[in-house]
Amino acid sequence: MAEKEGGREKRRMRSKAERRRIVEETLEPGASVARVARAHEVNANQVFRWRKLYREGRLEPRGPGTLLPVRIRRRRENPRRKAPDGVSATGTIDIDLGHARVRIHGAADPACVRATLEGLVR
């Protein structure tokens, strides 16, 4: 059972690895989500939510980074396209993540691009 703290139950935070192990137990032949949930003192509805995240690949451990396939195409420069002062508009980056698409024109701050992509990959 969850610990009581000040009259309210204290929620136990579980790591992705722990949630993944619990989900994988429910995928065994003959396993019952309700029984597995009870064995780990988790609400069965929560385990069903974790199963959804697992199917979406969102319970995978985060490594130092993931390499993604890249395709580079040459484009003819459009003389009508104007760049803001001090910014070189020599390129465009299109990133298609399946559920989101990001297009960056001209120069881009690498830290800003990284933060944007990390937010979308979650």
Image (cartoon, rainbow, N blue to C red):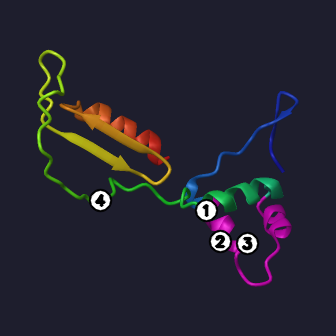
Q: Give yes or no for contact between labels 2 and 1 (Cβ–Cβ under 8 Å).
A: yes
Q: CA distance from mark 2 to mark 4?
A: 26 Å
Q: CA distance from mark 3 to mark 4?
A: 31 Å
2 vs 1, front mark: 1
For badge 2, the amino acid type reads Glu
For the residue pair 106 and 30, the one nearer the viewer reads as 106
Q: Earlier in the sequence, mark 3 or mark 4?
A: 3
As drawn, 85 above or below 17: above
Q: Which residue is mark 4?
A: 67
Q: Which residue is mark 3?
A: 26
Q: Earlier in the sequence, mark 2 or mark 1?
A: 2
Q: Residues within 10 Å of mark 4 (few under 14, many from 20)?
A: few
Lateral position of residue 120 relative to residue 42, left or right: left
Residue appearing at x 15%, y 30% in the figure: 89
Q: Give yes or no for contact between labels 1 and 3 (Cβ–Cβ under 8 Å).
A: no
Judging from the image, what secondary structure is the residue with disc 3 in?
helix
Q: Give yes or no for contact between labels 3 and 4 (Cβ–Cβ under 8 Å).
A: no
Q: Which residue is mark 2?
A: 24
Q: CA distance from mark 2 to mark 1?
A: 9 Å
Lateral position of residue 40 relative to residue 104, left or right: right
Judging from the image, what secondary structure is the residue with disc 1 in?
helix
Q: Earlier in the sequence, mark 4 or mark 1?
A: 1
Q: Say if the magenta span includes residue 27.
A: yes
Residue 76: image location, x then y, percent: 12, 44
Residue appearing at x 54%, y 61% in the figure: 57
Disc on res. 54 = 1
Q: Quadrant of residue 103?
A: top left
Identity of the residue furthest to the bottom in this view? 29
